[in-house]
Image (tube, grey):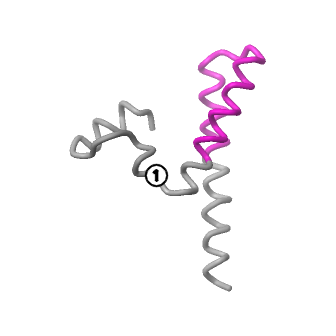
Amino acid sequence: MTAKQWREKNPDKKGNMRDYANINELICLSNMENINAVLIEDGLPQSERLLKLNNIAIHQMLILENQKESLYLK
């Protein structure tokens, strides 16, 4: 979700979404920022970057959440 969408969904919360993100979300967000910079450098249009970043973010969050669950099972 975009920062604007987050603010609209959470009008009672101060600051920004990073202030309320868990560690996995922060890791994913940092990765997305870095990947976005590479895609910009490669000349990909915004619409293509958005699709790629969304797919990568979903994949990364699934991996991060599965790792967390497997730690609890041990």
Count residues near mark 1 (Cα–Cα under 10 Å), then give few for <14, some for 14-19, many for 20+.
few
At 63% across and 57% down in the image, what residue appears? Answer: 62
Where's residue 37, x and y in %?
69, 25
Q: Which of 48 and 4 is in front in this view?
A: 4
Left or right position of 49 against 11? right
Q: What residue is shown with label 1?
A: 21
Residue at point 65%, 25% (across, down): 49
Residue 25, position in %: x, y? 54, 51
The answer to which image quadrant residue 5 occupies is: top left
In the rendered view, tell whether residue 58 sits above or below residue 52. below
The quadrant the N terminus occupies is top left
- Residue 2: % across, % down: 44, 33
Amino acid type indicated by mark 1: Ala
User: Looking at the image, which is closer to me, 36 or 20?
Assistant: 20
Q: Is the magenta stretch mostly helix, strand or loop?
A: helix
* Rendered location of residue 11, percent (x, y): 23, 41
Q: What stretch is highlighted in magenta?
A: 28-57
8 lies left or right of 3? left
Decide: is 17 above or below 61. Answer: above
Q: Residue at x 38, y 39 (%)?
A: 16
Question: Label 1's element?
Answer: loop
The C terminus is located in which quarter? bottom right
